[in-house]
Image (spheres, rainbow, N blue to C red):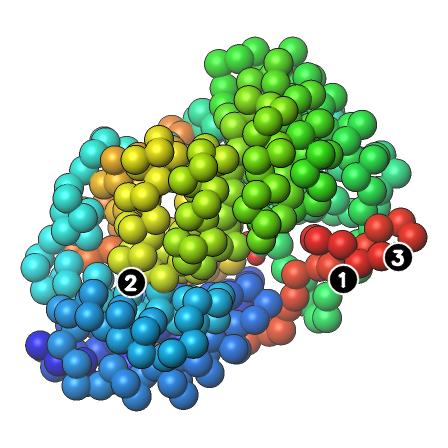
Amino acid sequence: MKIVSAKVIVTCPGRNLVTLKIMTDQGVHGLGDATLNGREKAVVAYLQDHVIPCLIGRDPHRIEDIWQYLYKGAYWRRGPVTMTAIGAVDTALWDIKGKAAGLPLYQLLGGKSREAVMVYCHANGADISEAVDSVAAHMAQGYRAIRAQAGVPGLDKVYGVPKGGAAYEPAEKGLPVETVWSSEKYLDHAPKLFETLREKFGFGLHLLHDVHHRLTPIEAARLGKALEPLRMFWIEDPTPAENQDAFRLIRQHTVTPLAVGEVFNSIWDCKGLIENQLIDYIRATVTHAGGITHLRKIAALAEIYQVRTGCHGATDLSPVCMGAALHFDIAVPNFGVQEHMPHTAETDAVFPHAYSYHDGFMHPGDAVGHGVEIDEALAAKYPYDPAYLPIARLEDGTLTSW
Ligand code: GCO
Ligand code: MG
C-alpha cells in the first residue's frame, strides 16, 4: 500500500477544527485531528509545507517508522506544533491500518481491557448554588464522574464558567480576552463548593476540579489539603508543570490525587512526574502528544508506577480525537477516566462517528479504524473564524497563567 496524497481540512462548525486526511492507492483513507486551539494555522502550515510532501509514496502500514522519520528526521524535536502534526499523521495511519485489516482500532491495540469507558463531564455555575444544580442535572444524565467549577465572588470571569448559562467553550472570537485572577479569592472559595456538593450528594459520586495552572506550589498544597476530607477523584493542573519538581512540594503536603498533562506533548514532559510518583493521572491525549503511537509509550511508562490515564477531551479536540482516544481508553490497561465535553450538533454532523455515550460511559463502537469520518461538503460550509484562548492578569495587572 502507498500514500498517494494528503490534505488538511479546516472547518468551524461553532469552533475551529483541523483534520488531516491521508489517501492511499488502495482507496482506503485515514483521518487525524490536528487542532491546536488558538494556533490552528501553524499546524496547517507545518503539515502542508513540511510533512505532507515527505509522506507521498510511503507505505502507510509502517506507522512506527513514519513516526520516527517525522520526529527524529526533523532534527527539531518536540513542541506542540510539531507533535500535533505528527499526532495527526499517526492517528490517520492507525485508522488506515484498522480499515485495511477490517478491524476496529482497539483490536489492533490488544483488544478490550474493559467493556466501556467511564467519562467525566463538566458542571459549572456562576455561584455555588448554580453549580449544585448543574451537578444534579449531569447526575440525571447518568454521569458517575463530574468536574465542578464555580464563579468566585469578586472575580468577573473564571475559568470553566460560562456567562449566561451557555455551554463552556474555551476560546472566543477575535483577539484574546483579558481576565482578572486572584488566587486569594479563589482559595477562600473553592473548598466551599466541594463541601456543599458532598453535603448534597454524598460520597457516591466522583468529583473532579480543574485549577488550570493558576496556583503556586505552596498554594496548590494548601488547596489539596483543604479538599482532602472531600475525597476528590482528582484536582487538575494545580500549578504549571514545566518545573516537574514543583509537584514534589505539593505531594509532601497532601494525598488529594493530582492530574496533569493536557498541555504536554511528549513523554519527556511527564517522565519525572511519573517516575517520581508525583502525579496520579496523566492527561496527555492522542492529538497533542504525538498520536496513538506516542501516547501508548507514555501510558506504558505510567503503568509501572500505577499512574492512570485521564485523556484530555475538551471540545477543542475534534471528534476524530475523541474516537481515537476511546479506542485507546478501552484497550489500555491503566485507564483512569476520559474527559467528555459533548460537541455541538453542527460539529457532530460534520464528523459522523461510531462512538456513543450511554449512562456515564462511552464506547468507541465497532466500525473499522477509529470510526470517525468527515463530511467534506458540510465542513466547507463553515470557514475558519479566528478565535483565541483568554489571557489572565493579577489584580495589579501582572500577566499570569490562564
Ligand atoms: C480541560 C481543559 C480545557 C482547556 C482547553 C484549552 O480540562 O478540559 O483545561 O478546557 O482549557 O482545552 O484549549
Ligand atoms: Mg484542564
Q: Is mark 2 within 8 Å of ligand 1?
A: no
Q: Position of residue 273 (x, y in %)?
A: 47, 42
As drawn, is 64 to the left or to the right of 202?
A: left
The answer to whether 20 is drawn above or below residue 242 in the figure is below
* Residue type of the residue flagged with mark 1: Val
As measured in the structure, the alpha-carbon distance from the residue carrying label 2 to the one carrying label 3 is 42 Å
Q: Earlier in the sequence, mark 3 or mark 1?
A: 1
Q: Along the line of sight, which residue is nearer the eye, 284 or 243?
A: 243
**Residue labelled with disc 1:** 177
Q: Along the line of sight, which residue is nearer the eye, 196 or 297?
A: 297
The numbered dot on residue 91 is 2
Q: Position of residue 150 (x, y in %)?
A: 71, 34
As drawn, is 245 to the left or to the right of 343?
A: right
| Residue 323 appears in view | no
Q: Along the line of sight, which residue is nearer the eye, 59 or 169?
A: 59
Q: Is mark 1 within 8 Å of ligand 1?
A: no
Do tag 2 and tag 3 residues touch (Cβ < 8 Å)? no
As measured in the structure, the alpha-carbon distance from the residue carrying label 1 to the one carrying label 2 is 33 Å
Crowd class of label 2 (few under 14; some 14 to 19; many from 20; radius 10 Å): many
Q: Going 58% across and 38% down the picture, which residue do you hit? A: 247
* Residue type of the residue flagged with mark 3: Gly
Q: Going 27% across and 69% down the picture, which residue do you hit? A: 67
Q: Position of residue 184 (x, y in %)?
A: 83, 35
Q: Earlier in the sequence, mark 2 or mark 3?
A: 2
Q: Give residue 48's quadrant in the image.
A: bottom left
* Residue type of the residue flagged with mark 2: Thr
**Residue labelled with disc 3:** 397
Q: Earlier in the sequence, mark 1 or mark 2?
A: 2
As measured in the structure, the alpha-carbon distance from the residue carrying label 3 to the one carrying label 1 is 14 Å
